[in-house]
Amino acid sequence: MQMAHLLSAVLWFLLIVVAPSAGAGIVEDNAFVVSLHELKFGADEFGFSSSTSAPQRPKTQKGATILELRHHSTLFKHKRHQNLLKMDEARATSIQAQIKNYNKFEEKKEFLPEAAQLPLSSGVKLQTLNYVTTITIGSTNTTVIVDTGSDLTWVQCTPCAACYTQQDPLFNPSSSPTYLSVPCNSTTCTTSLQAATGISGSCSQDHNSCFYALGYGDGSYTRGILAQETIALGDVQVSNFIFGCGRSNRGLFGGTSGLMGLGRTQLSLVSQTTDQFGGVFSYCLPTKLYNSSGSLVFGNDTSAFKNATPVSYTRMIADPTLAPFYFLNITGASVGGIPINASGFANGKILIDSGTVITRLPPSIYKSLKAEFVAQFSAYPSASGFSILDTCFNLSGYDEVRVPTLKLEFEGDVDVSVDVSGILYFVKKDGSQVCLALASLSYEDQVGIIGNYQQKNQRVVYDTVGSRLGFAKEPCSYS
């Protein structure tokens, strides 16, 4: 039974590759005036640095349980930029395909009870650009990827027919007195699993166990037994937590034990802990222009935040056919204080996703925004495009650059100023190829995606019960 009426929040602190501290630059006349040296530290996130910090111990602060949330780059060797962006494009493409498929079902008037498949190319494939935390399942510490675009939490288990190499010991169900298999004739195995993964569970020969299968577009997958177990999030225990005990798993999951699903269906961690945390979680993803730590918070205890501005909320748009995803309405944007006029704002439905890296915008919005940025950044020579990034510059001859501010506007007069580290993407460490960190969708009727690269140094609050998304400026550093 889940513990009820527990008001404490749970925080995970992010530990990523350490870089010397640097200022965020000066905001002057709707632009960031930043030294190129400061901006280059952003390039370290993608493989130029190999140093790491020692993990921090769990502790308690302001009534909250604090654990470590680490950047996935601390677990394995980085892939090249080209491959990373290809994987990011694959995830974005899979999301569009999923939305298109469900729209077809709606046109046929078919009923899908809170049904939503996981993206065909999951955020778990974006190895160096995801964030992980360590939780306890039974008595085993397991390091899992954090993903708002997934629902089912799963880890690798013994006996394992085919497991990839992970850094932690495999979870052994036979050594845990609190482990139980989910019966195959239960609604959890049928309706709930269908909603979370798009595929209903199947029965074992003795009908005592529920088998799940979760596939991804690149051939990655996890298969195993749907089970329940006591998990610990720091000092907070959750009984009878439903998760996938993976017996056959393959894919680009790095050295992690599995995945934590923070989507919106009944089997997500958020939904299963509503009694404890009120269906509220938030995160703050850091940039090395500040320190190397940030936080993921479960619960509505705002005293755990270090926000520099009040939290402003916009409406969370419900879409039962795409239940894992979080949607909101984008109503405008500005570059260097100049408003962007584009027809795409008329139908401004956009989703926010922690697993997608680069923000995707409808062509009309992207074209206008890019044109304004290029006009204001015309003092710097252009460079060839790179992968999905088509607007690049050669900044190698400059000690200091003036980067126009970028602001996104959402329903309810909620303005989000993108951190300077989320505006430019360093392809080459010497600055000879630095790109605008945004990409265009292929078609105007596709749904835009706000990626994690543009969410840095923001407290992003997901209130699933109140159906709202909140934003506040916050230096994502731990002290």
Image (cartoon, helix red, strand yellow):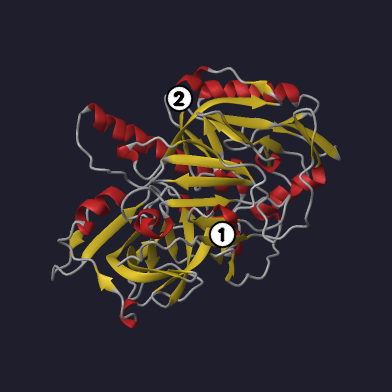
Residue carrying label 1: 72
Residue at horizontal 77%, vertical 24%? Answer: 378
* Amino acid residing under circle 2: Tyr
Q: Front-most of 386 and 36? A: 36
Label 2 close to label 1 by CB (< 8 Å): no
Confirm whether residue 255 shows in the render: no
Q: Is residue 424 left or right of residue 242?
A: right
Q: Quadrant of the N terminus?
A: bottom left
Q: Is residue 254 left or right of residue 23?
A: left
Q: Is residue 383 left or right of residue 15?
A: right
Is label 2 or label 1 in front? 1
Badge 1 marks a residue whose secondary structure is: helix
Residue carrying label 2: 443
Asked if residue 345 is positioned above or below residue 305 in the image, the reply reads above
Q: Quadrant of the C terminus?
A: bottom right
Residue 193 in the image, given as x and y percentages of width and height: 26, 54
* Amino acid residing under circle 1: His
Badge 2 marks a residue whose secondary structure is: loop
Asked if residue 105 is positioned above or below residue 198 in the image, the reply reads above
Q: Earlier in the sequence, mark 2 or mark 1?
A: 1
Residue at horizontal 42%, vertical 24%? Answer: 445
Image quadrant assignment for residue 185: bottom left
